[in-house]
Amino acid sequence: MYRAIHTPHQGSVLYSRYMVLGRLAVGSGSTIFRVEDVRNSNAVRAMKMARLTDGDQHSFDLEIMALTKCKGSSNFPQLVDHFVNKSYRVIVMTLEGEMIRDVLGRNRVKCFSNQNTLRIARQLLNALHFLHSNGFLHRTVNNENVLIKKTGLHLVVTLCDLNHVTPTESRQKLEHPGYYASLHAALGENFEERDDMVSAMYLVGELSGFIIFDFVVNDLIEAKKKFHYNPCSFFPDHKKWIGRLVQLIDRMGEGKKIDMDSLDRQYQKAIEGVSPYRPIVFKTVKNVVYVE
């Protein structure tokens, strides 16, 4: 089991440049700290630290390559600095908001409006397509590495935690499929673009207020089989667009490229009278974001 890094302490200055403000999160094999870049107008950044014994250099190099490819995209952290010393592998990135799980948790009814769910789905799938188009599969989409970031007057969906990426052509199977792993990946099939997007749609289903997988009646794989057999049956009429997107993405597997034009047409007709391109509706109370 991964052991979080408890040092450095708040106020410490690391590598003569980064002042530690506190610990942000503990990831899978790394610990993320909030730091100030004292050489760059005290800009607040995220510093991801991993012991040399946690992970490997190849995965670190792939993460750096993926972040470099995502330069300029508002849907991904922007790489600021990276290095390896005698104890740690370190990546410094821009801060990208808060986990969508936490934003959902403060919603009074514990689900987002149908319109907002659609707009979040479109942004998330587009972010994955951008990553795929630049040569990488994410492989671990879940409710902790999908973030919501306030940028000016709008909310942007961002995708972080690229430490499990692989090149798209590698099609490596998942060694330890988790809760959000697609049915195909959980069954041991080669991982491809479709599987990232199916994982994203499992999350979208949760954002809409539905627990898709029933652990009491089924084990996880059996529950996923049941869901994929007829995904539309899990949603009321006004939310069946979620199931239709899952069906459409399912048909894009086995080496097929994701047809983004088909997905776009599905977004446009998902909810009558609702544009998927409009901003996510939210309010801010004491600098805290609340999504409707």
Image (cartoon, rainbow, N blue to C red):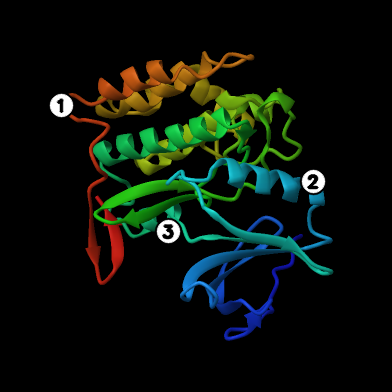
Q: Which one is closest to the eye, mark 1 or mark 3?
A: 3
Q: CA distance from mark 1 to mark 2?
A: 48 Å
Q: Left or right: 144 with respect to 119? A: right
Q: Left or right: 88 with respect to 195? A: right
**Which residue is denoted by mark 2 in the rendering?**
58
**Which residue is denoted by mark 1 in the rendering?**
273
Q: Specify the quadrant of the image occupied by residue 23.
A: bottom right
Q: Specify the quadrant of the image occupied by residue 131.
A: top right
Q: CA distance from mark 2 to mark 3?
A: 28 Å
Image quadrant where one finds the N terminus? bottom right
Q: Which mark is residue 97?
A: 3
Identity of the amino acid at label 3?
A: Gly
Q: Secondary structure at mark 2?
A: helix
Give the mark nearest the N terminus, 1 or 3: 3
Q: CA distance from mark 1 to mark 3?
A: 30 Å
Residue at left 53%, top 15%? 252
Residue at left 61%, top 76%? 17
Residue at left 42%, top 46%? 74
Give the mark nearest the N terminus, 1 or 2: 2
